[in-house]
Amino acid sequence: GDSVTQMEGPVTLSEEAFLTINCTYTATGYPSLFWYVQYPGEGLQLLLKATKADDKGSNKGFEATYRKETTSFHLEKGSVQVSDSAVYFCALSGVVRTSGSRLTFGEGTQLTVNP
Amino acid sequence: DGGITQSPKYLFRKEGQNVTLSCEQNLNHDAMYWYRQDPGQGLRLIYYSQIVNDFQKGDIAEGYSVSREKKESFPLTVTSAQKNPTAFYLCASSIESTGTYEQYFGPGTRLTVT
């Protein structure tokens, strides 16, 4: 079945440091890939997405590129801020074309950014 | 503003009581989902519904029940059969968008059972 593996956390960085959170996946066909962010005590917010190989999703300074050859979708940001402290989830959706599709989530990576 | 509402934000119950968590969306989405999140862990799918009057079990459906009588509403009942009900519960909805199935989440309900 489909699966998503994220780098283990927690990750602690200083403000303005470079961020990489690794995400690899196992799936049949060509899934869509997502990064979600969860701030303390809140629900998940969609951060960015990519729907086909070599697509780059970007939002709020975060980027991730859909790499089919390495089955990866690593999240990067060039200069993190204290306000980026949150839990980040990598996820994929299957290719079954029904009305709505299950998402498979990684375990989440806790990011803490210190001033 | 369109979105997903979950109420209440915090819920406390005694062991042995059933409790129903509310989820409403005004996004006109067809599909809705319920997830459970435990501290420091990822999301686990409880139930999902792709159309009104139809729903499917997710990975951890035991001890839970749902209904989908209206497109906008997908309430979750945590029954006394659920052995460890204390958790953070998240509702989501989705609609196909350019071939993807991105899900939109509500703010969550934190349930504590003592």
Image: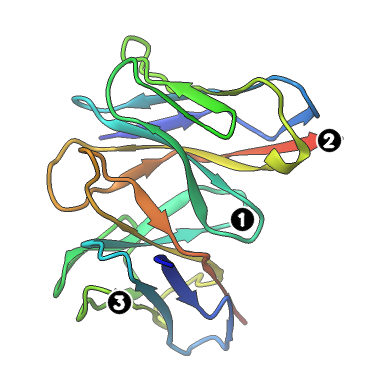
**Image mark 1: chain:** B
How is colour applied across the structure in the image?
Answer: rainbow
Q: Amino acid at mark 3?
A: Ser
Report which residue position mark 2 lands on.
A114
| Disc 1 from disc 2: Cα separation | 22 Å
Q: Which residue appears farthest toward the front when viewing the image? A: B1
Residue in the image at 51% along x and 70% along y: B84
Which residue bears the numbered disc 1? B39
In this figure, which residue is indicated by the disc labeled 3?
Answer: B73
Answer left or right for A66 relative to A75: left
Residues indicated by labels 1 and 2 sit on the same polypeptide chain: no
Q: Compute the Cα span from label 2 to label 3.
A: 41 Å
Q: Is residue A79 left or right of residue B29?
A: right
Q: Residues within 10 Å of mark 3 (few under 14, many from 20)?
A: some
Q: Secondary structure at mark 2?
A: strand
Percent position of residue B94, x then y:
29, 55
Circle 1 SS class: loop
Q: Are marks 2 and 3 on the same chain?
A: no
- Residue at 69 percent across and 35 percent down: it is A10
Looking at the image, the residue that sits furthest to the right is A115
Report how many numbered discs are placed on residues in the image: 3
Q: Quadrant of the N terminus of chain A?
A: top left
**Label 2 crowd (10 A; few <14 / some 14-19 / many >=20):** some
Position of B71 relative to A1 (above/below): below
The chain letter for the residue carrying disc 2 is A
Identity of the residue drawn at 56% across and 39% down:
A88
Q: Is residue A44 above or below residue A5?
A: below
Q: Which quarter of the figure has residue A42? A: bottom right
